[in-house]
Amino acid sequence: MTDRTGRLEGKVAVVTGAADGIGHAIARAMAAEGAHVVMGDIDDAKGEAAAAALRSEGCKADFRHCDVSVEADIAGLIAEAIAKGGRLDVLVNNAAIAIGGMPVHEMTDEQWHRLIAVNLTSVFRACKYALPHMIRQKSGSIINMASAQGHIGLDGWTAYAGAKGAVMSMTRQMAVEFGPMNIRVNSISPGTINTPMNEKVIAELGDHVARAWVKMHPIGRIGKPEEVAEAAVYLASDAAGFTTGIDLRVDGGLTAAPRFVPDLV
Ligand SMILES: NC(=O)c1ccc[n+]([C@@H]2O[C@H](COP(=O)([O-])OP(=O)(O)OC[C@H]3O[C@@H](n4cnc5c(N)ncnc54)[C@H](O)[C@@H]3O)[C@@H](O)[C@H]2O)c1
């Protein structure tokens, strides 16, 4: 772990989808900054191992099984944070799935409902269970994982983009509603990040997609999970005390401008 300065010392943070990818990087970074991290995921083996690894490094971390599409699991995860840490300062709604790569008329109702349950309804529910604690404390930071795809269009990802757009709208709405209670609500929109989610997309759609992704980012590469984690640590920290209702793009310039890349066409 890199040198840290205890930016989240004394805080209790819940991170969903924390066993792998961006969520895992966020849990690691927050724990390294002194937070007690309560990690939820459907992958119990990876999640338990990730929490145990953090504890072996002297960090405070617990894992609990949490399928974010199951209301009781979300309630249990928040309750675990209160039971273990005595408070709830940070909620990172990170878990999501990528169902896409097909036009709207080829998507089944079942795929649509699954995506909305995991990527959108989960955010509503986690906020619903977390907010009473934050309201009582008169403080809190909610960080919702959105996506560059909530800002720009990409063939085949209408449902995913729709859910991410809704996550951003809900973020703004809640920032307004709960600002007077000193609860900040922000989202992060990553560009393409090197995670298992994208390995799966490349396996399904082919290597040419990976090459195209690199070219679509003006910075000339895709991102690392740790680069998104840094943004989450900032938004969780007191240094972001006057920052609410924003969407922080961590996207290598992907959404800054449409790029004409001749050898892609
Ligand atoms: N990777 C990217 O390029 C990228 C870009 C923009 C936004 N995002 C967003 O960042 C977040 C993390 O993406 P990632 O690439 O790290 O994903 P990932 O698929 O690599 O990892 C997701 C983690 O969530 C867990 N998970 C899956 N379904 C779950 C469920 N129902 N309940 C609880 N946990 C579940 C998985 O087990 C895994 O540990 C997502 O919200 C995603 O939409 C990712």
Image: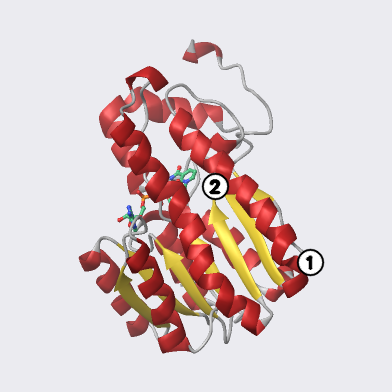
Q: Position of residue 202 (x, y in %)?
A: 32, 32
What amino acid type is highlighted by mark number 1? Answer: Phe
Residue 227 in the figure: left or right of residue 102 = right
Q: Tell me the residue at 51%/57% (across/down).
A: 124
One can see residue 4 in this view: no
Residue 224 in the figure: left or right of residue 206 = right
Indicate if the residue with disc 2 has its beta carbon within 8 Å of ligand 1.
yes
Q: Tell me the residue at 55%/11% (across/down).
A: 262
Q: Nearer the viewer, residue 136 or 229?
A: 136
Q: Position of residue 145 (x, y in %)?
A: 52, 52
Q: Please tell me in which quadrant of the rendered image residue 114 appears.
A: top left
Q: Tell me the residue at 26%/33% (across/down).
A: 203
What amino acid type is highlighted by mark number 2? Answer: Ala
One can see residue 123 in this view: yes
Return the residue at label 1. Answer: 242
Q: Please tell me in which quadrant of the rendered image residue 228 appears.
A: bottom right
* Helix, strand or loop at mark 1: loop
